[in-house]
Amino acid sequence: MSDISDELRRLMVSRRAGLLALAGIGAPLAAIGASRPPEPAPPVQIIEGLIPTLSTFPLGQEVALAAGVQAVRTAGFARAGLGSAMYIADPALDDDALATRPASVFRAGKRLFRLAEAFPTPEMFGAVADGQTDTWPAFKAAIAHCTRHGAVLMITSGSFLLRPAGRGSLTLDCDMRGAGLLSSTLLCDVVGHHGPVFTLGSYRLIADLTLMARGTAPTAGLALRADKRATFSGHMRVEGVRIHGFETNILISNCYQWSLRDSILSAGGEGLLYDGADFTADSDSGYFNDGSIEGCMIADNRRNLCIDPPKKSANLFIGRGTAIQNARGTTEQALLKKIRPLRIEMLYGEGAPQIPLLRMSQCDATIDGCFMSGTGGIDVGADWSSTTLRQVTGASPSDAFVATGGVGQSVVVEDSDIASPRTRITSRKQRFSRSTLGAETHGERIAGMSLALSPPGNKTAALHAIDGAQTLIARDIAIPARAAASVATVSLTAPNGPCVAIATPDHALEALIFSASVGRDGHVVVQAHNPTDQMRRIPRGLSVTIALFGFEPSPAK
């Protein structure tokens, strides 16, 4: 029985050894219970399973593998434990691939092996995340590999030093993801460098990492730059990224549909700059912006945001809890030009009182939810078409709203509280609803006119800029209910220039008749008439607001 057991044991060992040899793994395992001299060690040590493992990547060297080996693993790139990866034999490779991709392709006899990871890391190409070793060549090789094979470049935890001076820009035609903006840091030594460090390609994503500048130079941390040769270029996404300390943290030059989400742009010259300056005037560039900024903090830059395309842009959305704070410049925190439409939602602004939070030009803007604290407010300039404010609050006297427009321009303010005395609104069309602007409280629109109420008890007209011309407002003109003819007459000093008499009572507008005349002394006399047949419809002591504007005075003879 013992002889039969020994024979079965030898047969099993022989069968397993034959299978291993057929797979090309190398020498057979030592026979169990067999007594024969040990075979010499194979050139590649078998560590686990049926796949041989190399201690390091054979950079510039040829490896001796058995003919049947189709896959091999490395324990690391330059040293074991750092950059372990899987490689497979690829018959489509040639000597040119070996020459141009030495960090991801190696030779084993007549065959060539290439990196076969779906989510490669820079360490697989020789990078060391110690913040001191220059990893630019490794990143360049990693990006080229991911672009060629459709892989996602994963940035592990640690600090990777990049020295781009004299090397151009790394174009990301692949997605690049980190382990989190507090974990993965790309430290860019920009001294002597010009232009962007990274350029994001069309339909690509960069996410969950930090780009940080070391030194100063006229450079950008990240550029979103469309391919001029492509018909539709863009669809670029930046998510969960912190970009810190570059002359321009993000540079956008003519791209279609870009988005910036849950990111931080800080301590740079321009936080985000859209200018399209690298495109010629006779091309179709500069037309499309179609961008969105959501859930971001843009703070402590010389200017936090500048959208100034060469031609026109469209559909910019800023919202979902974005904060624009503490610009270090002296002009404005955010400059927005040629954007139609511009929509802003849930924006928080903080900064210096003398610096406007938003300065807009040639925009059709809707601001729905904005809280300002200690800023210079919102200035829509003079060359705009329409501006709508809803639920906008200014917490300090400097948080003003300034809109000085011309013919055809309109302002709508609803449910807002902008108490700054610096607030000025000049437009031909306006509507104010349940809002406080400067020293005035604005109520519901009645019969096509805006109801404007001065401070309570103010029976003396005060000069306000509300509707495109100088405006006089008086309040609390008592109208006795039993009077049948001219029941109220008030004399107001007319402004220099045209004026008109318009009355907007709290209710029962159809029951009153108003008239006005201008005397040679420049006084405007406004009369409120209460016809007898309407007497029952007018309550006792009706409070009336009278606004004067746009009237061509004809002095009484």
Image (spheres, rainbow, N blue to C red):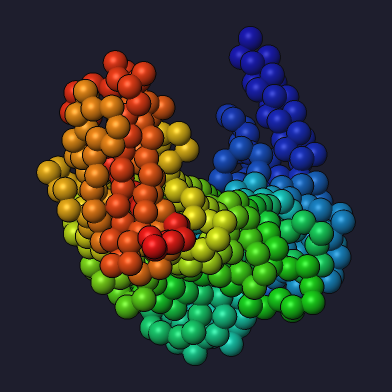
Which quadrant: the N terminus? top right
Asked whether 187 or 156 is in front, the reply is 187
Task: List x then y, in percent, for residue 451.
Answer: 34, 40
Q: Nearer the viewer, residue 85 or 182?
A: 182
Query: In percent of the image, x 21 and y 23: which residue is there?
Result: 482
Q: Is residue 419 left or right of residue 415?
A: left
Closest to the observer, 173 or 369: 369
> Which residue is depicted at the point 46% across and 82% down?
190
Residue pictured at 24% horizontal, 53% vertical? 491
The x and y percentages for residue 319 are 44, 46
Q: Looking at the image, which residue sits at the far top?
A: 1
Q: Furthest residue to the left?
A: 457
Q: Quadrant of the C terminus?
A: bottom left
Closer-to-camera residue (470/328): 470
- Residue 100: x and y in percent read 76, 73
Identify the image quadrant of residue 285.
bottom right
